């Protein structure tokens, strides 16, 4: 825990996804909310088919969903989401002439039903 999902539109060619995921993981560690850095799992998916709004025009997006075990205060969630948004905002030279929406969403995972196993090979 946590699980970070980054979804982004394919019209963001300068986005260095591996570097961004590492920076996002570092930002999560820096919040002090996670005891072990190896518990952070992040992944990215490029959306090849997407639409932003209804008007014609050049638009794109990058959206982070961060799933955390339930029980954190709204203040902690706000701190974490703002930390991730800062990293995302600074992630790339965003293309000129493209309206880009950057978002972070925090999701709670029910502690009682969450199961995890670790296999060290």
Image (cartoon, rainbow, N blue to C red):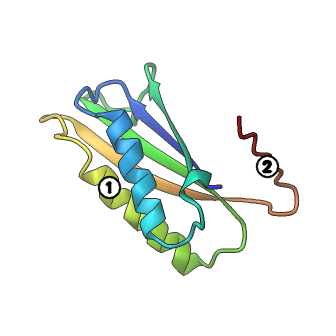
Q: Tell which of 35 and 84 is nearer to you.
A: 35
Q: Depth check: give the residue in front, 17 or 74.
A: 17
Q: Which residue is mark 2?
A: 116
The extreme left residue here reads 96
Using the numbered discs, state the Cα–Cα distance from disc 2 to disc 1 in whole angstroms.
Answer: 28 Å
50 relative to 78, above or below: above
Q: Quadrant of the N terminus?
A: bottom right
Q: Residues within 10 Å of mark 2 (few under 14, many from 20)?
A: few
Res. 83 image quadrant:
bottom left
**Which of the two marks, 2 or 1, is nearer to us in this view?**
2
Q: Is residue 21 above or below residue 98?
A: below
Q: Viewed as shown, does residue 57 lie left or right of 51?
A: left
* Residue at (62, 79) in percent of width and height: 73
Question: Which residue position holds label 1?
Answer: 87
Q: Secondary structure at mark 1?
A: helix
Contact, mark 2 vs mark 1 (Cβ under 8 Å): no
* Among the two numbered marks 2 and 1 on one chain, the one whose residue lies closer to the N terminus: 1
Of all residues shown, which one is farthest toward the front? 121
Viewport quadrant of the C terminus: top right
Q: Farthest residue in the right direction? A: 113
Residue 29 drawn at (x, y percent): 47, 63
Q: Position of residue 89 (x, y in %)?
A: 27, 52
Q: Can you give x and y, in whole percent of width and height, for residue 79 in the image?
A: 45, 73
Callout 1 crowding tier (Cα within 10 Å): few <14, some 14–19, many ≥20: some
Q: Residue at image x 82%, y 54%?
A: 114
> Residue 78's mark?
none
- Residue at x-position 28% and y-position 41%: 100
Secondary element at image label 2: loop
Labels in figure, total: 2
């Amino acid at each position: 825990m946590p699980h970070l999902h980054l979804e982004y539109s394919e019209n963001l060619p300068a986005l260095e996804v591996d570097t961004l995921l590492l920076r996002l993981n570092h930002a999560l560690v820096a919040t002090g909310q996670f005891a072990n850095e190896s518990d952070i799992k992040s992944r990215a998916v490029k959306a090849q088919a997407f639409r932003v709004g209804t008007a014609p025009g050049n638009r794109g997006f990058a959206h982070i969903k961060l799933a955390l075990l339930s029980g954190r205060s709204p203040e902690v969630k706000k701190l974490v989401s703002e930390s991730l948004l800062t990293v995302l905002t600074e992630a790339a030279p965003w293309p000129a002439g493209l309206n880009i929406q950057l978002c972070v969403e925090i999701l709670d995972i029910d502690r009682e039903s969450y199961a995890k196993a670790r296999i060290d090979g």
